Image: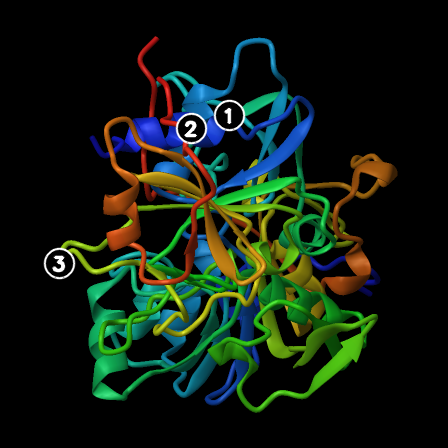
Amino acid sequence: MAGFDKVVNSYEEAMAGLEDGMTIIAGGFGLCGIPEGLIAQMVKMGKKELTIVSNNCGVDDFGLGLLLHDRQIKKMVSSYVGENALFEKQLLNGELEVELTPQGTLAEKMRAGGAGIPAFYTATGVGTPVADGKEVKQFNGRDYIMEESITGEFAIVRAWKADRYGNLVFRHTAMNFNPMAATAGKITVVEAEEIVEPGELEPSEIHTPGIYVNRVIKANFEKRIERRTVRQD
Amino acid sequence: MALTRDQIAQRVARELQDGYYVNLGIGIPTLVANFIPEGMEVMLQSENGLLGMGPYPTEAELDADMINAGKETVTAAKGAAIFNSAESFAMIRGGHVDLTVLGAFEVDQNGSIASYMIPGKLVKGMGGAMDLVAGAQNIIVTMTHANKHGQSKLLEACTLPLTGVDCVKKIVSDLAVIEVKDGAFHLLERAPGVSIEEIQEKTAGKLVVNGDVPEMVF
């Protein structure tokens, strides 16, 4: 009996059940806090027609950008894309669809999706191309647009520490979208730098409770830096 | 003389107040951090989930897990907090950020801003800009008054797709400080040696000039 033990020992197990046409919610901001090994496994599995919900789409040779090489992505839902030449090419060719979504709206879509809230109203995007085709409603004299929430068949998440029950702690700004992504997947898979025994994490310092998490795998991350800026001391 | 990028940032920094929470966009707005007056406490918010952004790290401090919204490696200032993206945008959309400074392609006399998309060019996305302009209490735009071809970027109505509607309160351009209110651009200050006529000529929207307009002093 595995009980609450969510730990799996191979990437095959971690991403088992991924099929063509699925929607995957991914944590990460740029290359910071991305589930590198789970993405690599998705590349290996070669599933196509995927919809990826992620703030960005990696770079040509790292992160979600790797899924572009074999044209696995049908649609990206993101706030900022195009850090990669291949992305641009596929977009201009019409091989790739992009739904540009304001960053706060994207975070809220994941959060609401995971919380069972089908839609919400926001002032973000009122009067802009983002509002096209969306319901507008006034509250207290101000216009708001209705945004629908997002869930996915899978969520892929990177954590710093996970216990066997799937309780998670994130490290620094590698947290970003990961906690919301974790709630929005039907199957939520977590890659963690460190796996500890239940009870080792301080309960009041857990960022994501294990109830949202289905699988946990231990990983070694490359942690590539996108813009290396330093000061002389 | 038109202001340099640093001078624009320096002028924006005079709008800061002690105890302000501020979000600085990419480009000239980022430079504002270099001109925070001595003795004043200002907390910088970075929308990827950091309140209290510090300087760039030394080689020894470099950490791939510590970045700002421009994806640059940074440090956390003393008293900083780190949180998830939904929390970060709750601060922004809930109106808790005192001041947002960002760049723009165009601003119009009603305070609408176009900053993320030029049709026909590749659209990379709005990132957090739409949330910031919809949520901040006070929005200052930094920009050049006219484009490379001499055409005004301060218009009667924006021509490019909008980032936000009726939200910009102030513009610090290379030529002037302008308040946007009551459907017009109000000239508050001019760059040293720049005439009212030149500003008038490079402002396509309605410009209101009241009496002598002081020159900025640096």
Q: Which residue is mark 3?
A: B149
Query: Where is residue A98, by image quadrant?
Result: bottom left
Asked if one can make out residue B212 in the rendered structure from this viewpoint, the answer is yes
The residue located at (35%, 72%) in the rendering is B160
Q: Residues within 10 Å of mark 3 (few under 14, many from 20)?
A: few
B78 shown above or below A159 = above
Mark pair 1, 3: CA separation: 30 Å
Task: Classify residue B198 as left or right of residue A24.
Answer: left
Query: Where is residue B181, by image quadrant?
Result: bottom right
Task: Find out whether the residues at labels 3 and 2 contact each other: C-beta distance under 8 Å.
Answer: no
Mark pair 3, 2: CA separation: 25 Å
Subunit ID for the residue under disc 3: B
Question: What's under tag 3, amino acid-wise?
Answer: His
Camera-side residue: A192 or A207? Answer: A207
Camera-side residue: B48 or A212? Answer: B48
Subunit ID for the residue under disc 1: B
Find residue A175 and report its horizontal and vertical position in percent. Answer: 60, 46
The residue located at (27%, 88%) in the rendering is A94
The residue located at (34%, 69%) in the rendering is B117
Subunit ID for the residue under disc 2: B
The residue located at (36%, 79%) in the rendering is A46
Q: Which mark is residue B11?
A: 2
Task: Find out whether the residues at labels 1 and 3 contact each other: C-beta distance under 8 Å.
Answer: no
Mark pair 1, 2: CA separation: 5 Å
Task: Find out whether the residues at labels 1 and 2 contact each other: C-beta distance under 8 Å.
Answer: yes
Asked if one can make out residue A157 in the rendered structure from this viewpoint, the answer is no
B146 shown above or below A101 = above
Q: Which residue is mark 1?
A: B14
Question: What's under tag 2, amino acid-wise?
Answer: Arg
Camera-side residue: A119 or B108? Answer: B108
Choose the circle earlier in sequence order: 1 or 3. Answer: 1
